Amino acid sequence: MIQRILSRHIREAAGKMPVIAVTGPRQSGKSTLVQQVFPDHSYINLEDVEHRTFARNDPKGFLQSLKGKAVIDEVQYAPDLLSYIQVIVDREKKPGQFVISGSQNLLLMESVSQSLAGRVAIFNLLPFSLEEIKDTHFALLIMKTIY
């Protein structure tokens, strides 16, 4: 796996902030990154229809069902969760309690900014940088293709 430069910054923020948000375009590596950086968090992907339905129909029950710290991937499918997350982090005050991720869109960012103001560190993950791929086999393939 290619080490992402953003990983270190996300870990640092998780030691201070109760919520970490990772956004970015599709296929930029958000899911892989949050699972790698937070292996001890429970992981729920709202692409799964059953999880999504539970989160939409009973946000409070959904969040109560999570044990300990959690990663909620594709959170844009259940934006009402953000208000419930706000209540929980205000009550419990645990750094790195929730990691949310999703494709970058205006509605998600507006919801995160409004619901979690002062409680969230927001990171935008872009596709690999040259620095990230310079020592990989992928970089060698690119160089062979160019030259």
Image (spheres, rainbow, N blue to C red):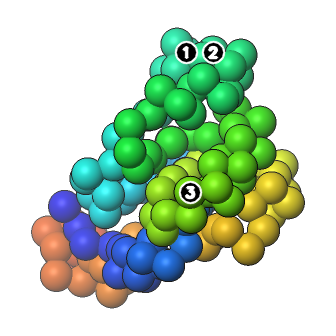
Q: Secondary structure at mark 2?
A: helix
Q: CA distance from mark 1 to mark 2?
A: 6 Å
Q: Horizontally, is 106 left or right of 139 in the view?
A: right
Q: Residue at x 48, y 68 (%)?
A: 95
> Considering only vertical position in the picture, is 20 above or below 62?
below
Does the rendering let one see residue 104? no
Q: Amino acid at mark 2?
A: Thr
In depth, the one of 73 and 61 nearer the eye is 61
> Considering only vertical position in the picture, is 33 above or below 27?
below
Contact between marks 3 and 2 (CB within 8 A): the answer is no
Q: Horizontally, is 33 left or right of 47 in the view?
A: left
Question: Badge 2 is on which residue?
Answer: 53
Q: CA distance from mark 1 to mark 3?
A: 29 Å
Q: Amino acid at mark 1?
A: Val
Q: Horizontally, is 18 left or right of 60 in the view?
A: left
Q: Residues within 10 Å of mark 3 (few under 14, many from 20)?
A: few
Query: Which badge, 1 or 3, is on the more N-terminal residue?
Result: 1
Quadrant housing residue 141: bottom left
Q: Amino acid at mark 3?
A: Glu
Can you tell which mark lies on residue 49? 1
Question: Badge 3 is on which residue?
Answer: 92
> Considering only vertical position in the picture, is 33 above or below 139?
above
Marks 1 and 2: which is nearer the front? Answer: 2
Q: Residue at x 50, y 42 (%)?
A: 73
Marks 3 and 2: which is nearer the front? Answer: 3
In depth, the one of 16 and 111 nearer the eye is 16
Q: Secondary structure at mark 1?
A: helix
